[in-house]
Amino acid sequence: MMPNQKFNSDRNFSQENSNNKVGQRNISPKLSEDLDLEIEEANPYLNSSEKLYQIILNNISDTVLITDDLGNFTFICPNIEIIFGYSPQEVKMLRNISALLGEGFFTFAELKTNGEIRNIEQEITDKQGKKHTLLINLKRVTIEEGTILYSCRDISDRKKAENQLTEYHNRLEELVAERTRELSITNENLQKEISDRIAAEKALQDSEIRFRSLFERHDAIMLLIDEETGTIVNANRAAEKFYGYAQEILRQMTIFNLNQPLHEQNQSELFPTNCLNHNCCTLTQRGANAETRWVEIHSSPIEYKNKQLLFLIIHDISDRVETEAALRESEQRFRLLADTAPVLIWMSGTDALCNFFNKPWLDFTGRTLEEEIGIGWEENIHPSDRQHCLDVYLSAFNSRQSFRMEYRLKRFDGEYRWLLDTGVPRFTSTGTFAGYIGSCIDISDRKELEEALLRISKAVESSSEAIAMTEVTGRSIYHNPAFGELFKYTIEELNAAGGIAAIFSNQKEYLAIFYAIVKGKSWSGELTMCDRSGRKRLIFLHADAIKDQTGNIIGIVTVHTDISDRKRVEQELEETNKKLRRSIQKLETNNREICLLGEISEILQSCLSVEEAYSALADLVPTLFPGISGGVFILNESKNLVEAVATWGKQMDSKSLFAPCECWALRRGREHLVDTQYSGLRCQHLHGNFPKTNTFCVPTIALGETFGLLYLSSPKRKHFDDAKRHLAITFAEHIALALANLKLRETLHNQSIRDPLTGLFNRRYLEESLDREIQRAYRNQQTIGAIMIDIDHFKRFNDTFGHEAGDAVLRKVGDFLKTSIRSADIACRYGGEELILILPEASLVDSLERAEQIRQAIKHLDIQHGYQTLGAITVSLGVSCFPKHGTTSDTIIRAADAALYRAKAAGRDRVISA
């Protein structure tokens, strides 16, 4: 590969100067002398850098070349002889880069477009005639002498690796077999050695010194352990070295401490039964360094110091285990690769008989491996192809040559399918012939295509599509009548104009398509082309390669479809669809808003009071105007103030209480928009001196009466487009109508339960409310007080001052009662000058106390009628209590009324309890 980026930038400077002489450019002698002088006077760093770069270039594995756009060499790496066999001076004598890499290597035009091409594989022949496969990377660089940098790497060995995979597999098998034989011999020797040693020990039981000497100095790892407990009685120096523990420490351990931690294996697993039974076993052990090693343990019983022990000889077999694992893994990889490959794979031995078929082959034929091996696979070959197939295979087998052949093989469903079978000989690492390996692909479709080719050629002539075939150079060799009619060229005229490239209006597009086809890719797309007169047409082009039987590209076929009219219609249709989608989206939005508007109106109509409606508006309006702040304002009864009754959003940007004259919408009686992008009258009820947001005010008018204002504000202008403004106006109408209906409903309800003169509840409401309060008090075990009030000498007021004065007295007393009672108390006009007060949860004592307070307060009322004072009035009051004086509304009222009459009879202006 090329050096790093710093090398590139420095090389552009130093190599550039050195190449002034090497490249032998046409430089004047004076200029050459000046350049040489500048080089000598340059910073010493440049000289050291140049030497460093020269060392790097001499030692890197890649070969670096630099050429101009014509392929002429401007720089040659010194190590070029390693790959090509030519010295740099010999390479300079070559014509250009094509003479070195091959005439088919042409990538300059694509570099103009992409600037870099990576991982091109090119086969070359070196000076000695040896073939190499190179991996070439090209990059356009900015150097004075050249513009294209080539990095060449010899990957021939990697190409050979695929063929060596089979050899490696066989080699592993041989190694394992050889290792197994060696281990068997070793095992036999060890068994013999152990037997000899046991015999010697029995013969020399009294020679403890000699035994210890043999035990300690032997290279094999030896342990003496207690057969019952596994305790290590003794260990030799080899064991000390192997385990990394001193002999004293080993004698304090058990064999189980060496075999695996107790939390990983139980004791029976740490020391298999066959070891205790004086046989050979294999397991893993860990020493002081915690490294796991595979060992093979040979055990024999021995009597030592009059005690029965187990004598262990331990061999480190970790390398052998790893080799066996690698072999199994290699075998598994090969079988997995073969069984998952999308091709049918077979293998044969040195006897030419097949001994392996992968899973895709067996799935294809529907037969078992036992049925296929040997010559069984020949049964599925088509009778007409069988002899030819065997002749080709055996001929190649005898000459140890690769082969390719086509034949029909019966599939599991009985259908014969054409296969392309490619076979290559296998050799071991020592060069011994091991058989053949082959792969098959289903080419039935290709065969059908070949048969259909004749039919297609006839169809091409009569096709309405413009079809042309050219050489890879772009020279036209055929086009059908439709092509000539579309582009107004004969073959001779087209070649005279420059070949197929003449109809491309953009030559870069032509080159891109050309290189895509050369690389084996097809190309389809829309582009602009020109006919002979220069008229441009929109063409849908499909281009593909024409290949020979070996797969080499020998030409290009192109199909041209004039889509100018179709494209125009598609554009018109697309524009129509866009308009339709916008209309549908608008209709969907309008429909959603209408549904929301209807739902809000329905909820408002269901509200029992305007206060409930105000609360509902604050929650519902944001769903209709998302992202918009605002509020609903109501005019007071005097029409001199506008007050916010429902607000929403983060920033309303308006006063909550203002005069109607401060809003242009209320003053004009129509909607008013303030747009921040355009100048406009800003309402005075908005905060700030300058508009920060867009606002929209809509008066709420129903039945010709203005009820208030719908106010909306947002920093985004799109929130107040025509549709939103129209929606706001419609919503304001719904609000006005709903509030008008609620107020009318409240008015009618009040008229049905209120006394028009005093404003107190009427007798009908009294009866309904008292029954309800009695039920509540009964459930909650509470009391209810009732006070019956009668104005003393009321007839005298009517006779003296007139009935209007009497009405004034009743109104005054009624207003007093409404302002001096609790919210839960009920004040009613019972009839004439008689009034009644219901006090929920009040005891008899509380009611009497409250009655006395009312009596005293009424005596101090200042009642005027016209321009005269009517004087003080007194009242008589009768008090009753639930449940003491009755359990029904009638009994409680009658009890209070009877107490009232007793108060009048007692002299009036007093409170009497029932």
Image (cartoon, rainbow, N blue to C red):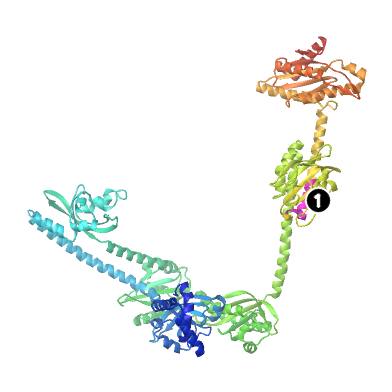
Residue at 75% of width from left, 17% of height from top? 892
Q: Which residue is mark 1?
A: 672
Secondary structure mainly formed by the magenta segment = helix
Q: Quadrant of residue 154?
A: bottom left
* Residue placed most toward the observer, 270 or 839: 839
User: For this view, does 686 lie left or right of residue 385?
Assistant: right
User: For this view, does 203 lie left or right of residue 779?
Assistant: left
The correct choice, above or below, for 81 with respect to 882 in the image is below
Relative image position of residue 527 (x, y in whole percent): 64, 76
Relative image position of residue 488 (x, y in whole percent): 68, 85
Q: Quadrant of residue 242?
A: bottom left
Q: Residues within 10 Å of mark 1 (few under 14, many from 20)?
A: many
Picture quarter with the C terminus = top right
* Residue placed most toward the observer, 493 or 247: 247
Amino acid at dot 1: His
Q: Quadrant of residue 835?
A: top right
Residue at 80% of width from left, 34% of height from top? 746
Residue furthest to the front = 41
Q: Please state the extent of the stretch shown in magenta in the rendering.
A: 719-732
The correct choice, above or below, for 535 with respect to 620 in the image is below
